[in-house]
Amino acid sequence: EAQVTQNPRYLITVTGKKLTVTCSQNMNHEYMSWYRQDPGLGLRQIYYSMNVEVTDKGDVPEGYKVSRKEKRNFPLILESPSPNQTSLYFCASSSLASRGLRGSTDTQYFGPGTRLTVL
Amino acid sequence: AQKITQTQPGMFVQEKEAVTLDCTYDTSDPSYGLFWYKQPSSGEMIFLIYQGSYDQQNATEGRYSLNFQKARKSANLVISASQLGDSAMYFCAMREMGTGRRALTFGSGTRLQVQP
């Protein structure tokens, strides 16, 4: 089954304790991205990657790191989490292939989300 | 200025009836894509339907159709024959093709409740 997986799904941690949220996709997608969702602010892009070893900042990158050593994985790293990083996090992936005959092949498919609470 | 506007914070619909969720957008990029996602109470984001700015026909996917009016910059989602399982938050999103980072810009969402 084609999917994007994230782990953990829920995490409660304390300020300053480094954590990693993993993201993996099995669709051979080149593009991967992280978003956070906050009430009243909607979903905002944190970081994205166009391919292996190619990453760049989104709208709200402060306090986050990412890496893309393999095509299927795109972990999100919080080196020193703070309470304002409490949020619902989504990983997404899409193909960079040219558009097919019908519809778009660059639709972003989302993982199930990770609900993070930083105390 | 808001790039994606969803003016209906909440909507009610009777089971088996059709419902239209509104979305207007703002962009100067001639090439863009419009998406609708569903977010049930469990939290995941489920892709529903896509419309490209150059598409001549309105997109359809099963019970979902997108009423695309380019001149009005609107991309309303129509759900036909509503089911109880359609109760969820619905987000309209846009991707401007001119930006390299391919970020989706989301609206604030519409909470749809289907009543039996």
Image: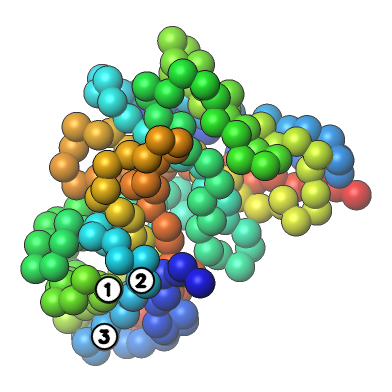
Q: CA distance from mark 3 to mark 2?
A: 20 Å
Q: Amino acid at mark 2?
A: Gln
Q: Image check: A40 left or right of B58?
A: left
Q: Is residue B111 above or below residue B21?
A: below
Q: CA distance from mark 3 to mark 1?
A: 20 Å
Circle 2: element type: strand
For label 3, the residue is: A19
Quarter of the picture holding the N terminus of chain B: top left
Disc 3: CA contacts within 10 A as few (<14), some (14-19) or many (>=20) = some
Q: Mark 2 and mark 1 in contact (Cβ < 8 Å)?
A: yes
Q: Do tags 3 and 1 sit on the same chain?
A: yes
Q: Nearer the viewer, mark 3 or mark 1?
A: 1
Chain letter of disc 2 in the image: A
Label 3 vs 1, first from the N-terminus: 3
Nearest the eye: B60 or A33: B60
Q: Residue at x 33, y 75 (%)?
A: A23
For label 1, the residue is: A72
Q: Which mark is residue A25?
A: 2
**Splitting the image into 4 quarters, where does residue A64 fall?**
bottom left
Q: Amino acid at mark 1?
A: Arg
